[in-house]
Amino acid sequence: MTPEIMSTHGLPRAHQLDAWRGWFSSVFEVEKPDEARQGFLAESRYWALDGFGIGQVSAPGLRAVRSRELVRRNPVDHWCLTLGQHDTGIRTPEDSVAVPAGIPFLVSLGVDLASERAADERLHIYLPRDSFAEIATQLDAARGLLLETGLGRLLGHFLRNLVRSLPELAPADLPQVNAAARAMIGACVIPTPERIRLAAGQIDATRRDRLRRIVRRNIESPQLDAGMLCGALGVSRTQLYRLLQGEGGVAHYIRKLRLEVGLARLSDPSHPGTIAEIAAQLGFEDASRFSRAFRQAFGATPREVRARARAEPPGWDAQGIRPLSDFLRGL
């Protein structure tokens, strides 16, 4: 899917802030300190997704105000679910809150509010009242709340993954995207047992994706075990075991990912480690155990994979562009 893009990057520095203000002016008044001495390099990407919208915004520090006069002049009353990479200060009629980085929070554009933040890249999920009428009362009750729960953090991870996937989606995918997003928002913002049940499959898929990333980040750690994963993922041992039931258990899953990393390193002719060193880095007590497990997983020994990689012709290096094989190894 192709987003609508508003960018100040191609404008003269003196006009950048005015252009950004003009684009936002019907919804927010934008204030920025030291504006006379600095430009304002910013970009917004927006996707309309069949009943709700997503905005990805990268901008310098600013203060955005939705005054009562703006609410009266432009009475859009969508809820806005926001996820930032840095802390944000929010003032609503009910309260003033400091929102930590990475924590989703919900506001309503139907009331006056102000937000203040440093330079940031953030996501805005716009939820029209007509599209979410069945949970309007609950969303109004949740406005101004920080979703600091395990489910709230899970929702943040889901939203980041969704935005990363948008360029690959086609219009025909929108009904499924809409259903998945609605289920996750309903389950994580208003976590009734029924909503959690309806979103169970999506919740588990998102947790498995987070789990894989956590294991890959800690692939060489001697402390990588069920206890570490429960703490990092925010789940109980029972939930973790259920999540990995189809993978043969926690230890088998960790070993599987370690072997995959071993395969990537041995397939890279520039990797300097010996087979024994790679085995030790990946938690195997000796190279022979690593070799047996490796052959069982991939049908070839580590020595055979390394020899094949080193026998291949050198990779393409046109104008500094790395070959596809290097790109795939880096994923």
Image (cartoon, grey):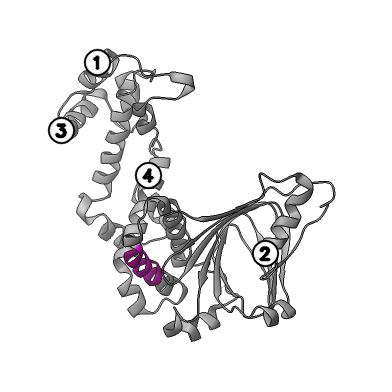
Q: State how far apart marks 3 and 4 are (Cα).
A: 21 Å
Q: Residue at x 84, y 46 (%)?
A: 37
Residue type at the position of mark 1: Ala
Question: Which residue is denoted by mark 1 in the rendering?
Answer: 307
Question: Which residue is denoted by mark 2 in the rendering?
Answer: 24
Q: Earlier in the sequence, mark 4 or mark 1?
A: 4
Q: Position of residue 249 (x, y in %)?
A: 23, 51
Q: Residue at x 38, y 61 (%)?
A: 235
Q: Which residues are magenta?
A: 174-184
Q: Residues within 10 Å of mark 4 (few under 14, many from 20)?
A: many
- Front residue (pair 230, 22): 22
In the image, 266: left or right of 98?
Answer: left
Q: Residue at x 45, y 60 (%)?
A: 159
Q: Earlier in the sequence, mark 3 or mark 1?
A: 3
In the image, 326: left or right of 137?
Answer: left
Question: Which residue is denoted by mark 3 in the rendering?
Answer: 296
Specify whether residue 157 is painted magenta.
no
Of labels 1 and 2, the one closer to you: 2
Q: Earlier in the sequence, mark 1 or mark 2?
A: 2
Of labels 4 and 1, the one closer to you: 1
Secondary element under disc 4, as helix, strand or loop, is helix
Q: State how far apart marks 4 and 1 are (Cα).
A: 28 Å
Q: Residue furthest bottom?
A: 137
Q: Residues within 10 Å of mark 3 (few under 14, many from 20)?
A: few
- Quadrant of the rendering where the N terminus is positioned: bottom left
Q: Are marks 4 and 1 in contact (CB under 8 Å)?
A: no
Look at the image and tell me whether residue 211 can be seen: yes
Q: State how far apart marks 3 and 1 are (Cα).
A: 18 Å
Of labels 2 and 4, the one closer to you: 2
Q: Position of residue 153 (x, y in %)?
A: 48, 62
